[in-house]
Image (cartoon, rainbow, N blue to C red):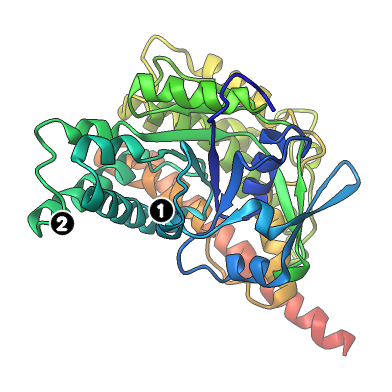
């Protein structure tokens, strides 16, 4: 056990592909499964119940499979954790992006419960630092939603006045963790195996600077690869990652689904050709234009500097298959694929379309709207081709 942070505790919410990868590296390749890092169930999730019912969790790395007992590494939801007398110092939130707002509701409920038995300062002190690690451009929206929930709680008398000083402390605990950590799930339900990718960098941004550094120190002490953005705002880090995600996931889907609807998994090295793909630059041009409008990018920064920096990151994991391509494959096999973007991509495209329209960047708004339509048309073709092939095999 590391002596740097003997009381360091980290919750990972929920059990999932990204969370499993974080768990693997924060326990130094499962060499320090000592209770300091625990999975936290998402309230209302059936997966956590399935893990508890099975009694074990299966992780894999570099061809080796590891079985962990659920009792050893899994906790109930946040309120259940409080009732059991355990709350993590840091909570890595790795849910689907469209589940983040419900997590904010749980967080406020946790504060309300703490305030019943502690004075306000002590209740706020016990609140975990939240590190939102899902993909997307959402930090500002989630922060506004958190404030609205807190104000509503004050209105109904569930919390005392927070504007005298506590509000800033609470909102300062909301951090953004923009991550390049990879991992994927094989199988479903109790048979699922979570494959953990190699260590990937996570940049911590947003929130209070001191809390950000505290989270970074704690997570790093446990063996994680976390870096603190001292000056860059959360939206800047989100836009940098959005470029990588949009290239790999959306343009990747356009390449993975052929003109006749045939779908195939593609690795990063197959998505990006040796010579520059013109649309990679075109997409970047629009993302950077919108990023400048919302001050994610500073005017002195050249487009080429931003573009080349993001491209270097995007093409780095050459053997990695983008998560959205795996998602399409799984949905096709299950017969549940719909001709629409997954929530992850929607939380990337919807904000940039909205920002572009508000900033008067009509050309960029039209480009992103067209990109959505093209991807959804390809998904429709893949669904139809899969259905035809399935019938012919019967």
Residue pictured at 52% horizontal, 34% vertical = 178
Residue pictured at 34% horizontal, 29% vertical = 207
| Mark 1, other Cα within 10 Å: few <14 / some 14–19 / many ≥20 | some
Residue pictured at 66% horizontal, 26% vertical = 313
Q: In the rendered view, would you say 267 is above or below 314?
A: below
The reply, left or right, for residue 47 in relation to residue 206 is right
Label 1, secondary structure: give it.
helix
Label 2, secondary structure: give it.
loop
- Provide residue 242's location: percent of width, then percent of height: 51, 37
Please tell me the numbered disc located at residue 158: 2
Residue pictured at 49% horizontal, 18% vertical = 303
Snapshot quadrant of residue 62? top right
Q: In the image as oriented, which residue stretches furthest toward the right? A: 63
The alpha-carbon separation of the residues under discs 1 and 2 comes to 17 Å
Q: Earlier in the sequence, mark 1 or mark 2?
A: 1
Report the front residue among 283 and 250: 250
Report the front residue among 79 and 184: 79
Q: In the rendered view, would you say 96 is above or below 168?
A: below
């Amino acid at each position: 056990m590391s002596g740097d942070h003997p009381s360091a505790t980290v919750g990972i919410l929920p059990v999932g592909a990204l969370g499993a990868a974080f768990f693997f590296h924060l326990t130094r390749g499962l060499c320090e499964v000592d209770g300091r890092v625990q999975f936290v169930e998402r309230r209302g999730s059936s997966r956590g119940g399935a893990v508890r019912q099975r009694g074990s969790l299966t992780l894999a790395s570099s061809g080796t499979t590891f079985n962990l007992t659920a009792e050893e590494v899994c906790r109930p939801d946040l309120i259940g954790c409080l009732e059991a007398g355990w709350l993590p110092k840091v909570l890595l939130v790795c849910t689907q992006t469209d589940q983040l707002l419900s997590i904010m509701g749980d967080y406020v409920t946790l504060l309300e419960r703490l305030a019943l038995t502690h004075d306000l300062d002590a209740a706020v002190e016990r609140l975990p630092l939240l590190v939102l690690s899902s993909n997307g451009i959402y930090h500002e929206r989630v922060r506004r939603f958190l404030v609205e929930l807190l104000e509503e709680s004050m209105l109904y008398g569930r919390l005392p006045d927070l504007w005298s000083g506590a509000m800033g402390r609470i909102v300062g605990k909301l951090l953004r963790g923009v991550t390049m950590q990879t991992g994927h799930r094989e199988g479903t339900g109790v048979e699922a195996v979570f494959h953990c990718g190699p260590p990937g960098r996570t940049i911590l941004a947003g929130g209070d600077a001191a809390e950000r550094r505290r989270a970074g120190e704690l997570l790093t002490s446990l063996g994680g690869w976390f870096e603190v953005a001292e000056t860059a705002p959360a939206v800047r880090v989100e836009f940098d990652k959005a470029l990588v995600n949009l290239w790999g996931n959306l343009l990747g889907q356009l390449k993975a689904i052929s003109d006749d609807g045939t779908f195939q998994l593609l690795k990063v090295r197959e998505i990006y050709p040796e010579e520059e793909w013109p649309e990679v630059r075109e997409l970047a041009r629009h993302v950077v234009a919108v990023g400048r409008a919302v001050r994610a990018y500073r005017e002195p920064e050249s487009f080429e500097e931003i573009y080349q920096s993001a491209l270097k990151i995007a093409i780095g994991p050459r053997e990695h298959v983008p998560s959205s391509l795996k998602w399409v494959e799984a949905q096709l096999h299950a017969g549940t694929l719909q001709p629409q973007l997954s929530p992850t991509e929607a939380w990337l495209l919807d904000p940039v379309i909205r920002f572009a329209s508000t900033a008067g960047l009509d050309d960029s708004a039209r480009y992103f709207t067209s990109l959505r339509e093209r991807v959804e048309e390809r998904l429709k073709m893949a669904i139809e081709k899969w259905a035809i092939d399935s019938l012919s095999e019967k």
